Image (cartoon, rainbow, N blue to C red):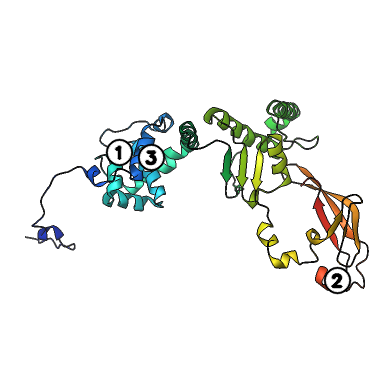
Amino acid sequence: MTKHIKLQKDYTASCLYYQIKLPLDIEKNIPSDDPVRLLSTFVEGMKLSDLYNTYGKIKKDQVSPKQLLKIVIYAGMNRIYSSRDIEKSCRQDINFMYLLEGKPFPNHATIARFISLHLSQCSSNILAEVSNILFDLGEISGETIFIDGTKIEANANKYTFVWKKAVTKNQAKLLIKLADFVAECEQLYDIKIVYGNVVKIKHLKRLRKKLYALKDAEHNLKFKYKNITADAGYESEENYLFLEANNQIAFIKPANYEISKTRKYKHDIGKIENMEYDKISDFYTCKNNWKLTVSHIRHNKTKTGYVSEKTIYTCENCSDCPCKSDCIKGNGLRMYSLKVLF
């Protein structure tokens, strides 16, 4: 008769003095003011029809999509992002057990599939619903939105193939329709997409993003943010003009805000911000009393088609200047570029 070798020790053999005691409900051990109770009540009041529509069939004896949503949100509140760590918390943490309501523990594969296949399809609608509920409760004013981070679009190949003959046949008609469509959208939604007389693919991509943003705002949000707060990555003349056209107030941190407060920056004679400016004659005066006058206007075009103007100021004479070594590097004249509108 073969004997089975036990690699794992049976620790339950020493548990002789434990017995089942009342109460059996783990909810009794959770404080009444615990955040997990607020989260559960908040999610129970949400309409999660978009989330349930991502499922074909839901088994009754398994954890429901609403419970999985609670678990994922509560895990994020506690800085738990790995699906395996979430599974471990469901087996050891009574707060996660409280959200499960006696259902079996979900494994890490179930949690990962929920996030990637189901929650990702309706996350924007769920976040919009959360904002609407908080707005109705008076927890947010709906006036200021804080934006952090910078979006970077990947140049990925989608492996899409189009027949050349079919495109060239109706290319002229298509371009005319696209130009009329862009002009109609600019007039209807009061947005500026094309800066010039040529409509390009990048203009259509930008229009698509703006239309999707307008669609989400109209269908999901009940209000419009008046104040836009963002970091230095969003500072640009184009963004400022867009917010001004939409009657929104911008609170964007300047790119040189931190360095401009230093003593070295304030005492740098080569910075045009530290020079005297004559508004009437439009010129700057350096430390050696030389004038920096306007030499020309430079136009820069962004990837979206926006054209900005920069005024170039040039010093009259930098030769034999005793402050030249502290002001500029090289043997040329001192030149500065300043934006006209921003």
Confirm whether residue 220 shows in the render.
yes
Which of the numbered marks, if any, corresponds to residue 324? Answer: 2
Task: Please name the residue that numbered disc 1 is placed on.
Answer: 63
In the displayed structure, 78 sits above or below 27; it is below
Task: Please name the residue that numbered disc 3 is placed on.
Answer: 69
**Residue 17 coordinates in the image, percent (x, y):** 8, 57
Circle 1 — which element? loop
Point out the tag, 2 or 3, that comes first from the N-terminus. 3
Q: Which of 203 and 289 is in front in this view?
A: 289
Residue type, label 1: Val
Residue type, label 3: Leu
Of tags 2 and 3, which is closer to the observer?
Answer: 2
Report how far apart the C-alphas of labels 2 and 3 lie in the structure: 64 Å
Res 183 quadrant in image: top right
Report how far apart the C-alphas of labels 3 and 1 lie in the structure: 10 Å
Res 50 quadrant in image: top left
- Residue density around tag 1, few if under 14, some if 14–19, many if 20 or more, within 10 Å: some
Of tags 3 and 1, which is closer to the observer?
Answer: 3
Name the outermost residue toward the left: 1
Q: For the residues labelled 3 and 1, say whether their Cβ atoms are less than 8 Å apart.
A: no
In the displayed structure, 326 sits above or below 17; it is below
Circle 2 — which element? helix
Point out the tag, 3 or 1, that comes first from the N-terminus. 1
What residue do we see at 91% from left, 64% from top? 290
